[in-house]
Image: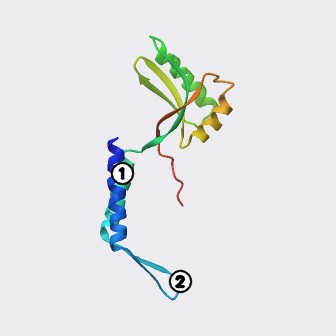
Amino acid sequence: MKSKSILAVIIFGLMFLWFQKISAQTTEKGTLTILASPGIDSLVRLHTAYNEAFPIISGFRIQIFYESGNQALDDCEKVQEEFSSKYDNIKAYIIFAAPYYRVRVGDFRTRLEAEKFLQRISRKYPNAWVIKDEINLPVLLTN
């Protein structure tokens, strides 16, 4: 919850500075020059640094296995390895929340994405289900 309040303050600050000091001007050649308060750049840098320090967002994963007991961790590692060998482009995570070890897969931003992938794996993992979770930020491809 703390991360949401920090993000809200950053967004409010950006909006405040945006409405206070921004102006735009078009030159004859069709280029656009934006004159903005230096505070906007510092807030953008602050927001970028925050995302680098806490690279998670709210999203969805698919829980394919859970178990408790003395062999639970070993069983989860086997399920994780088996899954990763078949779906090398989807990350599998082992999560512990007493008394269960869980194997959750994927970093889906929407429930629809997760449900679509669940349909692909439902024969192999018939007891799997979509669960709301904190996911890793997707990697953006840059030129």
Relative placement, left or right, of 24 versus 40 is right
Task: Tell me: residue 121, above or below residue 72.
Answer: below
Q: Label 1: state its secondary structure.
A: helix
In front of the other: label 1 or label 2?
Answer: 1
**What is the CA distance from the residue labelled 1 to the residue labelled 2?**
35 Å
What residue sits 44% from the left and 43% below the top?
A: 57
What residue sits 63% from the left and 32% below the top?
A: 118
Q: Going by the picture, which residue comes out furthest to the top?
A: 70
Residue 26 visible in the displayed image = yes
Relative placement, left or right, of 96 versus 65 is left
Q: Do the residues labelled 1 and 2 touch (CB within 8 Å)?
A: no
The residue where tag 1 is placed is 7
Task: Tell me: residue 87, above or below residue 76.
Answer: below
Instruction: Give the number of marks.
Output: 2
Q: In which quarter of the image is residue 10?
A: bottom left
The three-letter code of the residue at mark 2 reads Gly
Q: In which quarter of the image is the N terminus?
A: top left
- The image shows residue 34 at horizontal and vertical percentages of 41, 76
Q: In which quarter of the image is residue 17?
A: bottom left
The three-letter code of the residue at mark 1 reads Leu
Label 1 packing within 10 angstroms: few (<14), some (14-19), many (20+): some
Q: Earlier in the sequence, mark 1 or mark 2?
A: 1
Viewer-side residue, 72 vs 7: 7
What residue sits 56% from the left and 22% below the top?
A: 79
Q: Which label sits on residue 64?
A: none
Q: Quadrant of the C terminus?
A: bottom right
Residue 89 visible in the displayed image = no
Relative placement, left or right, of 139 versus 88 is left
Q: Which label sits on residue 30?
A: 2
- The image shows residue 29 at horizontal and vertical percentages of 53, 86
Q: Label 2: state its secondary structure.
A: loop
- The image shows residue 6 at horizontal and vertical percentages of 32, 49
